[in-house]
Image: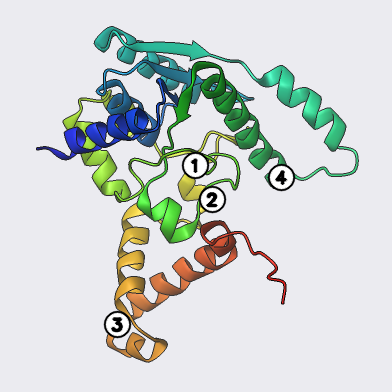
């Protein structure tokens, strides 16, 4: 059985075991959400594929719309919903920007507003919010918003590296425009890409760094690496370390 069928069956089994009737997934025009929404559609369960523009670059939103149309044309169980959250975000920003005007915080707030919308749809349709994070993002560098795109019910591609997601996209015949598009979280009004946010490291480099990090037991073993790999590993750690809190359980005070 091919990996796409394995994942799709896993999603369907989880939904049915937990008496969930629908699958809800946000689509951004990126490869991860395009692959996940397609895998959801393959379950034959009712799927809500939701485009949620918030001050989004038009070219990114256009890809989201194209993928939504592709899904609807290919699968009879998919509804493509376009929910413009600009007004919601503008009201939130108006309240926050006087005392808490921070660009990074506002980018994360966009993600959390989107997630609130997805959970509302899931709550109204007895559904599951399906995550779109891959392995290097979710468990390598923590490249997601806590309680935003990280706040999902299930995460079907979180054990796949980005390169594997790209390959899966090709196998699923995802639109070539989406496969070729520079990865981005769509949260920045200046259109910055993942490469811009990650210090110039490509996903290929981060995957290698993650592999090295999982292989090396302690720093003394770094002497066996090339200078290039040592530098790569240090850059990876500099991105990973500030985000470790996202990947760990919420700290709980234990009474004596």
Farthest residue, direction front: 256
Residue at image x 70%, y 68%?
253
Instruction: Determine whether label 2 and label 3 are within 8 Å by CB.
Output: no
**Residue 193, disc:** 1
Q: Circle 4 is placed at which residue position? A: 105
Total marks shown come to 4
Instruction: Determine whether label 3 and label 1 are within 8 Å by CB.
Output: no
Residue 28 position within the rendered picture, expressed as x and y whole percent measured from the top left = 46, 27
- CA–CA distance in space, label 3 to label 1: 30 Å
For marks 4 and 3 on the same chain, the one whose residue lies earlier in the sequence: 4
> Neighbour class for label 1 at 10 Å: few (<14), some, many (≥20)?
some
Residue 138 position within the rendered picture, expressed as x and y whole percent measured from the top left = 44, 52
Element at badge 1?
Answer: loop
Residue 148 position within the rendered picture, expressed as x and y whole percent measured from the top left = 59, 40
Residue at image x 58%, y 32%?
115
> Neighbour class for label 3 at 10 Å: few (<14), some, many (≥20)?
few
Residue at image x 9%, y 37%?
1
170 with respect to 90 (left or right): left
Q: Is residue 202 visible?
A: no
For marks 2 and 3 on the same chain, the one whose residue lies earlier in the sequence: 2
Element at badge 4?
Answer: helix
Q: Circle 2 is placed at which residue position? A: 197
Element at badge 2?
Answer: helix
> Neighbour class for label 4 at 10 Å: few (<14), some, many (≥20)?
few
45 with respect to 129 (left or right): left
> Neighbour class for label 2 at 10 Å: few (<14), some, many (≥20)?
few
* Foreground of the two, 33 or 190: 33
Instruction: Determine whether label 4 and label 3 are within 8 Å by CB.
Output: no
Instruction: Determine whether label 2 and label 1 are within 8 Å by CB.
Output: yes
Q: Circle 3 is placed at which residue position? A: 225
Residue at image x 20%, y 35%?
4
**Residue 30, disc:** none
């Amino acid at each position: 059985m091919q990996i796409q069928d394995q994942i799709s069956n896993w999603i369907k089994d989880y939904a049915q075991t937990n008496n969930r009737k629908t699958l809800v997934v946000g689509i951004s025009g990126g490869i991860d959400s395009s692959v996940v929404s397609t895998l959801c559609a393959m379950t034959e369960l009712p799927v809500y594929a939701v485009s949620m523009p918030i001050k989004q670059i038009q070219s990114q939103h256009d890809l989201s719309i194209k993928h939504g149309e592709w899904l609807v044309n290919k699968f009879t169980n998919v509804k493509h919903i376009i929910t413009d959250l600009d007004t919601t975000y503008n009201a939130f920003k108006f309240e926050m920007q006087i005392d808490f005007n921070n660009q990074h915080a506002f980018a994360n707030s966009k993600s959390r507003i989107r997630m609130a919308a997805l959970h509302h749809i899931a709550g109204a349709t007895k559904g599951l919010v399906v995550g779109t994070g891959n392995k290097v993002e979710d468990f390598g560098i923590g490249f997601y918003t806590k309680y935003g795109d990280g706040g999902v019910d299930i995460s079907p591609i979180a054990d796949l590296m980005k390169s594997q997601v790209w390959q899966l996209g090709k196998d699923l015949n995802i639109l070539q425009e989406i496969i070729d598009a520079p990865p981005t979280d769509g949260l920045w009004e200046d259109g910055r890409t993942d490469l811009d946010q990650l210090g110039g490291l490509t996903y290929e480099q981060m995957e290698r760094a993650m592999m090295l990090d999982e292989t090396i037991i302690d720093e003394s073993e770094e002497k066996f690496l090339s200078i290039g790999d040592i530098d790569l590993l240090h850059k990876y750690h500099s991105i990973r370390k500030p985000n470790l809190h996202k990947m760990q359980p919420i700290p709980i005070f234990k009474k004596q």
